[in-house]
Amino acid sequence: MMLASTANDLFWMSRYVERAESIARILGAARRISDVPQVIGGETNEWTSALAAAGQLHAFTATGRAPDEESVFAYLAFDEANPSSIKSCVAMARQNARSVRPALTTETWEAINSAYLEFRDIERAGGSRRQRQDFLRWVLDVSLRVSGTAFRNMLRDERYWFTRLGFYIERADNTARILDVKYHLLLPEHADIGGSLDYYQWAAILRSVSALTAYHWVYRQALKPWLIADLLILREEMPRSLASCYDNITTFLDELALAYGRQGPAQRAARATHSRLANTRTDDVFKQGLHEFLSDFLAENNRLGTAIAEQYNLI
Amino acid sequence: MAGVMGKTAKGSEPIGSGKPFDEMNGFDGECREAYRALKDWLEETPTDLLDQRKLEAEALFRRSGITFAVYGDKDAEERLIPYDLIPRVLSGAEWNRLSEGLTQRVQAINALIVDLYSKAEILKAGIIPEELIYANPAFRPEMIGIAIPGNVPVPIAGIDIVRVDADDFYVLEDNARTPSGVSYMLDNREVTHLLFPDLLGRNRVQPVERYADELLAVLESLKPVNSSGDTTIVVLTPGSYNSAFYEHSFLADKLGVELVEGRDLFVRDDILYMRTTQGPKRVDVVYRRVDDDFLDPLTFRPDSMLGVPGLFSCYRAGTVTLANAVGTGISDDKAIYSYMPEIVRFYTGADPLLHNVPTWRCREPEALAYVLDHLGELVVKEVHGSGGYGMLVGPASTQAERAAFSEKLKKQPDNFIAQPTLALSTCPTYVDGCIAPRHVDLRPFVLTGASGTRIVPGGLTRVALREGSLVVNSSQGGGTKDTWVLEE
């Protein structure tokens, strides 16, 4: 048994850290593709896609700024007015962590607190491209430190399970969103007409979920869009895939159900999604329509978050 | 007589001679026994090592989030309380004397509060004027007639002590509401362990870390009359924006209990519950760090968002213990303070072991006249004030400040007391690369449970870092020191 607000803070703490990492990866991938010579790159604006993948396109457009590298980076990384900027995520994660300080190990608390303190220094250091790249690396390190200390040191009890649940629900959301923004590039009919731009784009998708190397290990062939979809949606061995996220989500929800002696709507919903992912083939996904499939998934994942909050009195 | 209590201060001679007593070097520059090992160590330790350790200490505090918020200072959301590297040392014999006096005083405070909210015998005996109690905003009529668990309204007290020579301890202030600072007592010792293990090794210092165990035992011993089977304890905090939030979270952690905010609790049928992931869970003892006013909007301030509606009716029904009880602030009042020697005699039948600082109660016309004539030599304080705010330190004030202050005094004499400027003792302190004497006070934490009073040997030493300053409050640039009590 634990305080419901503690569970809520732990859940959101790890969501925010994972979100910060995800935005850092999206920015890194966008940067990389925007380096591709214009001849190949054509007119696509990677920075608009980055905003869409981060779920911030509307909010950014409303600021009236042009979606260039400078301002998108500023908005997604440093803008305090953007509640999903990396800076906001770090501050919120730290606020959640501070509220539940006793529920965390010293190492996890210090990982988050140091990140919060270092952020100011890093921000002050300025914004050359080189520094931005260092910054993105640093964000990944922070996320690694937070997850790593939690994984290595936390007691395997409800505190840990809620922490991991937040992490995987956020992760599933991010992967689905990144795929959805580029879904048109992954349609099979596109493969024939795709040129080298597509190749860069495909690689960028994989890179933004750090799966480029994994792809080669799993398939041992050149990038094929349907295989990318397969990897990121259905492959359980791929830690950022939707299937893997749900494998973990059901595991941790089951642990909770076992410890509390009862299960509810959250367990049933998670298991339904998990088994659907396990019983789906890539063909089915494309038959249903990739975009439709992903939209449905995002809505379902969102509903699961609400179901968890309701079932466990999170406020 | 002009309302001067305790030792009479003729004129306003500072207590103690002109030159302050130094706890390491006494009045005459000869090292006192308890400080010998420390002094040797200071002499052989190069200052660049101290500088380096100071940086390490700051990084440590920052990384661990040992910070406090300063009200009215937006830029500094969280600040560090400066930690001074050089510990303060009390001998075992000094501590034993002090500890006896503290026990006596806190027992009298507990008896006073129980009495004021029941038979009020001390008022019938004419020891304290009735209007000083009944017209006092810190007096809570809601408490009258309520059975206080264990008859201990003040399980946790922080008594501010100063000294002016080798022998005498003076009580400067009694804190019977929600005294803070104990986390610094414990953290400062941890930091000394980390930074100067060799120094600790050379001295036989009594440990402080059992404070949490003692506190837990005290809270468990005070479970309510109508409690549930097992005693569930929580720490109630106003939230993470409160200046002392770090301490609240620290204490919950050390006690191994939940840290809750008002929104985590609710009342049903006069029983208090917390919201958990598995539904409501009954709560028996609340170590609350929320002020009386904000505790329960149904009984106290209706606009409070920090409290729990119905909490006070649980208390009245005996299903919950509040530690400390409501209405204990009456004994913190500085006008009541001036009666403390009589209060101690009244309840314990013995002479007080700790001195009170002579105090002019400005509500008495003769005293007011005296104070107005001698503003330049006195310290004038608000009776309900704390944190060093709203006071005038005569010797450090300008003519204009004194003029403004006498207007305030004349308008609301009831609101003020005055005391002679104390020549507070000094301790060697590391400032700007030098070791120099700075004024200190001491806040020991006195715990009282159903079976008596316990004091962990130590306390929070606050030090005024500015040369000559007597204001030790952390909100006004004071620092802290690790406080050692040596084995006898």
Image (tube, coloured by chain):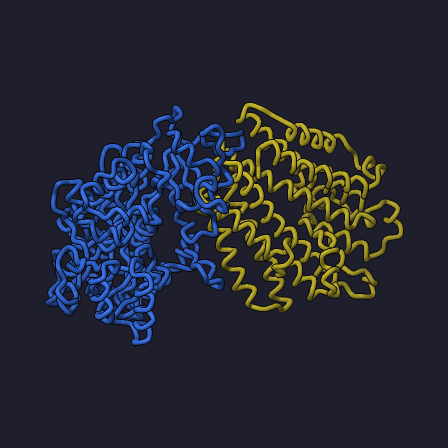
Residue A261: give x, y in percent of width and height. Answer: 55, 23
Taking the spot 47% from the left edge, 42% from the top edge, the residue there is B297
Residue A43: give x, y in percent of width and height. Answer: 83, 63
Taking the spot 12% from the left edge, 43% from the top edge, the residue there is B350
Res. B481 image quadrant: bottom left
Q: Which of B312 and A32 is in front in this view?
A: B312
Q: Nearer the viewer, residue A279 or B413?
A: B413
On the question of residue B79 being in view, the answer is yes
Seen in the picture, residue B356 relative to A306 is either above or below; the reply is below
Res. B16 image quadrant: bottom left
Q: Quadrant of the C terminus of chain A?
A: top right
Question: Does A258 sit left or right of B481 as displayed?
Answer: right
Residue A304: give x, y in percent of width and height. Answer: 67, 35
Taking the spot 78% from the left edge, 48% from the top edge, the residue there is A223
Question: Does B280 sit left or right of B24 as displayed?
Answer: right
Residue B131: give x, y in percent of width and height. Answer: 28, 48
Seen in the picture, residue A1 relative to B294 is either above or below; the reply is above
Give the mark count: 0
Taking the spot 42% from the left edge, 33% from the top edge, the residue there is B313
Q: Nearer the viewer, residue A100 or B488?
A: A100
Q: The yellow chain is which one?
A: A
On the question of residue A236 being in view, the answer is no
Question: Does B293 sit left or right of A78 as displayed?
Answer: left
Name chain B's colour: blue
Seen in the picture, residue A53 relative to B422 is either above or below; the reply is above
Question: Does A227 sit left or right of B33 as displayed?
Answer: right
Q: Which of A194 and B165 is in front in this view?
A: B165
